[in-house]
Amino acid sequence: MSITDKNSVLILGAGVSLPFGLPLGGGMMDMICKNLTDEIDFINNDENDGYWERERIKDAAASCRGFEKTPIYGTVSSKYASPNINRFDSTLDNEHNKLGQLANLLRNQTSETIDDFIVENPSFAELTKIAIASSFISSLYEKKENQIYMSLRSLDAREVSRSLKNENPISERNWIHLLINIVRHGIREGSVTSKNKVKIITFNYDQILEHVLEKQFSNTEKGKEYKHYTEYFKIIHVHGKCGELKERIFEPAQTCWKWGKGIHVVNEFNVPENIKNARKEAASIIQDASEIYACGFSFSGPNCRLLKIGTPRAKAKERTISYCNYDGNIGLHKAVEKYKMEQEDLPSGLVSFGNPEKDTFTKIEEISGTLEKPIGVVDWLRLGSLGELPG
């Protein structure tokens, strides 16, 4: 079994972006709430007939320096405010008031995920998406001294570092490099071609995967023998995506606004046609797949129904679902198990989805860590989950 086999597909969730410093979905609401509260306190720190407040907001909308301090306020203000005026219209005032309301909503929310929060609070959806995008830009970019732009942190190095709260940064092997090695091996063997691409369905908004592939896929002496990575990879973003990761951003507020508009969560109304088409294509691939791999993916009900994981077509008579359970989470284990129905006459380890004439028999493979010794995406790959790593 390998991701390079025909009719194989890899599902990616937020967990695979964590090594690059991006927040997980579960903690996103708390993080946005804290960021908003800090921004509000900073903006309102001085009282001088609103002068300093206006200046700080204008600076956040127009400069990298100001954006770093108040990215959410800066992004919202960039739509309505001109850096050449000292007075903002009532629309902007209303938006600023809504940011305070958003902070309170997040502080007292009952939703478990940011996706559910957006669906439950549609009038705050746009601002919430801006806040998500701002957290991505703040995590991926930095402004160095004497720069008028923000620089992208290194994402394509052999090891990537992320910071843990109150701890020193930790370094991890770049898992995308390991994926590249598996796919290159498949190209050399002839199993990966422009007609048999490696199919990846991602629920992540970021384009870290594409960025690293662009920089590193052909970064070898033999790289000139390979075509562009898009000839070997088919990547589908079912929840939309933020913009391309450029090496430099000169207008982060405007960039953040565009990134926020690219986010579309499950069960949200008014999803654009390109996202609907991407979801249909992803579901079709999943239904016909004989090998499904998943990493960093929580197997939440809405997302699994979107992909139609529980309703494979008869074309896939037998299939394997292989997934990574980082810390042995029993909830994740149950989430996968609920999609199968045991039948006494099936061989051990195989399950049926309930139609004796058209059943797809599915084998479930779980690679699991523990709370004390969790496994990460790199461990999962090194165990050969996606195929043999070239020695």
Image: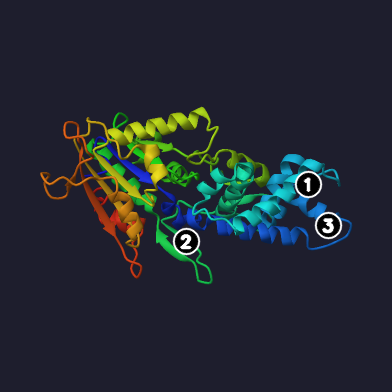
Lower sequence index among marks 3 and 1: 3
Task: Name the spot of residue 177 as percent of width and height, x first.
Answer: 37, 50
Left or right of 220, for residue 387 = left
Residue at numbered disc 1? 93
Mark 1: amino acid = Asp
Q: Give how far apart the Cα atoms at labels 2 and 1 are.
A: 39 Å
Lower sequence index among marks 2 and 3: 3
- Seen from the viewer's position, the closer of residues 11 and 317 is 317
Vertical order, 367 against 227 (above or below): below
Q: Nearer the viewer, mark 3 or mark 1?
A: 1
Residue pictured at 53% horizontal, 30% vertical: 272
Residue at numbered disc 3? 52
Q: Do the residues labelled 2 and 1 touch (CB within 8 Å)?
A: no
Question: How busy is the neighbourhood of tag 3: few (under 14 within 10 Å), some, or many (20 plus)?
Answer: some
Task: Name the spot of residue 203 as percent of width and height, x first.
Answer: 44, 44
Q: What element carries label 3?
A: helix
Q: What element carries label 2?
A: strand
Vertical order, 374 against 362 (above or below): below
Vertical order, 320 against 24 (above or below): above
Q: Residue 161 carries which label?
A: 2
- Seen from the viewer's position, the closer of residues 352 and 166 is 352
What is the basis of the colouring in this image?
A: rainbow
- Which quadrant holds residue 236? top left
